[in-house]
């Protein structure tokens, strides 16, 4: 909002206070959709539509990576498995830089998957991913892609070739301008803020290597079971089905190395917030897509009906809450809702209610 009002596209601000925790890519996306869609929506809703752009990039490049690694059903299972993760359901709708970072990592991982076959294009996408990761979150988060690249060079002969060296060079050539453009603009327009941002960035990098009692290094082991549900179950199944032979396949190695690189980086950073776990969902969804079609029929049916029942229960709960807010029935729930939002005014939206009723009836007919 401050960018749109003041016209300063270099420094994100909260009021008049500079906000230099992350570079401004998430702000640029929000300003773009706020400008384009504000004639049709309130400005805050129009800005929030930018999340859809980042999620679309995330899902498209997840599907492309799955197609490059395995092809077939994995192409569409991987993004569907990602959508189904509880963590993305909770955090993926928020206008935050972590969602932009997730899209950037998806682009970078696709570049890594493509590079052995098409070195120029793969290197270019890897560079775009590195640059976007910096513009989304800052200097430390691109290290996840760098660690993935180093890991693949160590374990896979396909990444110890002159072709991949060419890919790495192209990635650097693409990434360096993307990384440099905002700091350079900041230095030219606000040199004192550039010095402040540089000091913060160096401190952030230094803290990665320093352990302290405030860091929660094992936090992501605790949060992963619910945050990555149910992808982690199917990822383990894929590793079980592929066995020892699978560990020698690039199709298994890349998502596995990606997960270890992300998990290692996050554990080293030790920042105990569940939103930081979003990047781990990406390689788990890729792993989960490998062998889901080889699940026993009974397990597939159980998972299918689990999903059906969860959706049905949440649908019914939504109607109960709507009834309490709109009509005051049930009364105790209505009292609770109005205690949370005392100034709430009920508005009868006939067409919305009719549309929701039709969708609900169709759901039960399909089930």
Image (cartoon, grey):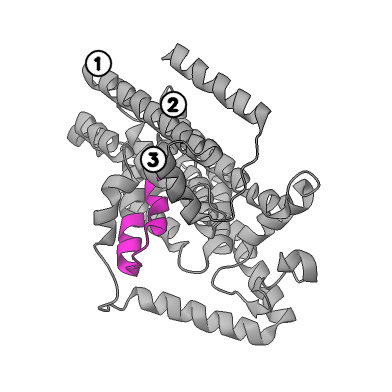
Q: Marks 3/2: CA distance?
A: 22 Å
Q: Position of residue 313 (x, y in %)?
A: 37, 30
Disc 2: which residue: 71
Outermost residue on the bottom side: it is: 192
* Image height of 353 relative to 175, above or below: above
Task: Locate residue 76 relative to residue 286 in the image: left or right.
Answer: right
Mark 3 vs mark 2: in front: 3
**Residue toward you, 338 or 196:** 338
What element does badge 1 sit on? helix
What is the C-alpha distance between the residues marked 1 and 3? 22 Å
Q: Residue at x 31, y 40 (%)?
A: 229
Q: Is residue 268 magenta?
A: yes
Q: Which residues are magenta?
A: 262-281
Q: CA distance from mark 2 to mark 1?
A: 22 Å
Mark 2–mark 1 contact, CB under 8 Å? Answer: no
Labelled pair 3, 2 in contact (Cβ < 8 Å): no
| Residue located beneath label 1 in the image | 297
Measuring 33% from the left and 22% from the top, which residue is drawn there?
A: 304
Q: Earlier in the sequence, mark 2 or mark 1?
A: 2
In the picture, residue 309 is in which quadrant?
top left
Q: Which mark is residue 85?
A: 3
Q: Where is residue 202? Give x, y as percent.
A: 47, 80
Q: Is residue 7 visible?
A: no
Res 92 label: none
Q: Is residue 318 left or right of residue 298?
A: right
Q: Quadrant of the N terminus?
A: bottom right
Asked if residue 103 can be seen in this view, the reply is: yes
């Amino acid at each position: 909002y401050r960018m749109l009002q003041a016209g300063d596209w270099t420094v994100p601000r909260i009021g008049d206070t500079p906000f230099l925790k992350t570079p401004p890519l998430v702000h640029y996306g929000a300003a773009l959709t706020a400008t384009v869609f504000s004639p049709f929506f309130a400005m805050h809703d129009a800005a929030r539509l930018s999340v859809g752009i980042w999620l679309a990039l995330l899902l498209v490049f997840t599907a492309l990576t799955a197609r490059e690694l395995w092809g077939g059903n994995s192409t569409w299972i991987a993004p569907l498995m990602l959508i189904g993760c509880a963590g993305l359901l909770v955090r993926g709708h928020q206008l935050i830089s972590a969602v932009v970072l997730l899209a950037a990592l998806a682009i970078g991982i696709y570049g890594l998957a493509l590079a052995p076959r098409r070195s120029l294009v793969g290197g270019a996408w890897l560079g775009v991913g590195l640059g976007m990761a910096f513009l989304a979150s800052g200097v430390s988060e691109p290290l996840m892609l760098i660690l993935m690249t180093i890991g693949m060079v160590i374990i896979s002969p396909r990444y110890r070739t002159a072709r991949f060296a060419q890919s790495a060079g192209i990635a650097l050539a693409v990434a360096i301008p993307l990384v440099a453009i905002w700091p350079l603009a900041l230095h030219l327009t606000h040199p004192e803020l550039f010095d402040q941002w540089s000091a913060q960035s160096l401190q952030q990098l230094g803290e990665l290597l320093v352990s302290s009692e405030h860091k929660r290094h094992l936090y992501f082991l605790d949060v992963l079971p619910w945050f990555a549900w149910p992808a982690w179950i199917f990822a383990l199944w894929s590793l079980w089905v592929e066995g020892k032979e699978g560990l020698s396949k690039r199709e298994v190695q890349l998502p596995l190395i990606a997960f270890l690189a992300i998990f290692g980086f996050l554990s080293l950073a030790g920042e105990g917030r569940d939103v930081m776990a979003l990047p781990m969902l990406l390689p788990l969804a890729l792993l989960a897509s490998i062998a889901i079609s080889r699940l026993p029929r009974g397990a597939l049916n159980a998972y299918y009906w689990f999903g059906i029942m969860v959706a049905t229960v949440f649908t019914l709960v939504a109607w109960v809450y709507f009834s309490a807010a709109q009509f005051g029935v049930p009364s105790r729930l209505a009292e609770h809702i109005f205690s949370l939002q005392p100034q709430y005014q009920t508005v009868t939206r006939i067409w919305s209610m009719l549309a929701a009723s039709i969708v609900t009836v169709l759901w039960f007919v399909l089930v």
